[in-house]
Image: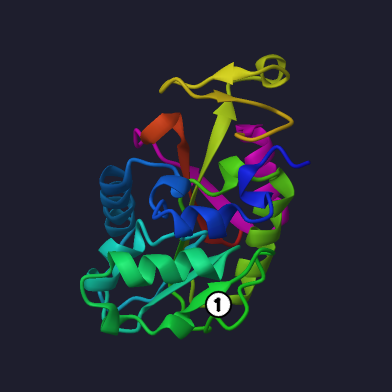
Amino acid sequence: MSSNPYEVDGFYASAIAAGRHRDIVGGRWEETGRIGLALLKNAGLLPHHQLLDIGAGALRLGCKLVPYLDAGHYWATDASRDILLAGHRAELAQPERLDPAQLIEDAHFAFPGVPQSITHAIAFAVFPHLTRDHLERALISLQRFRRLECFLFTVFLAPDAARAQSPYRQPDGVVTHRGRAPYHLLEIDVQTMAQRCGWTLTRSDAMLPRGQVLFLAVQGHA
């Protein structure tokens, strides 16, 4: 049995049926949505840009971005399309501004059906729940978006190789692990992976919920 609840059969269906679509995307709904929007604006996102929200869940960030971006400029992926559609039904003030066809089921970070016009991408609080190969897969797949100006993503870090071997308590109190969710990584490993996949990373000093660390990735090597 998987240690990750998101991979348990029926997890999404039962939560949606119980009206818990907000709860299963990690809580701190309003705070996290505001933070994500602010990070994207600081990275240069303007209404005319086109945004890919990776692992968008119930549109915790999407409900902020859909009113901000020009109509049709928000795209979202998630392992469960049902949770995306639950967010579309319940969380958008103007659901007509987002075609449900732009909510795409994608458990493999292949981004099927996402247009080449994407200029910005974000994966907020996604990779802490997944093994490192998922991040690598996303970095490889995102290379096909030639207009992409930046990709923002968060991870948990352990401060050094010795402490990475054991459970590590993050600044906000959550305990992360090397071998099960929530996962932590070493910064050097994140940087090396990104470089191998054709990206240059900048670590942000932004203070994020639960002690996550934000990286800004741009295509090409410094």
User: Residue 195 or 143: which is nearer the viewer?
Assistant: 143
Task: Name the amino acid type tagged 1.
Answer: Arg
The answer to whether residue 21 is above or below residue 71 is above
Image spot of residue 137 (x, y percent): 70, 59
| Direction from residue 89 to residue 163 in the image, left or right | right
- Identify the image quadrant of residue 219: bottom right
Q: Is residue 184 magenta?
A: yes
Image spot of residue 212 (x, y percent): 46, 35
The residue that appears at 63% across and 76% down in the rendered structure is: 144
- Identify the secondary structure beneath mark 1: loop
Residue range in magenta is: 183-207
- Identify the image quadrant of residue 143: bottom right
Image spot of residue 210 (x, y percent): 42, 30
Q: Pick the quarter of the image with the N terminus.
A: top right
User: Residue 105 or 214: which is nearer the viewer?
Assistant: 105
Residue denoted by label 1: 146
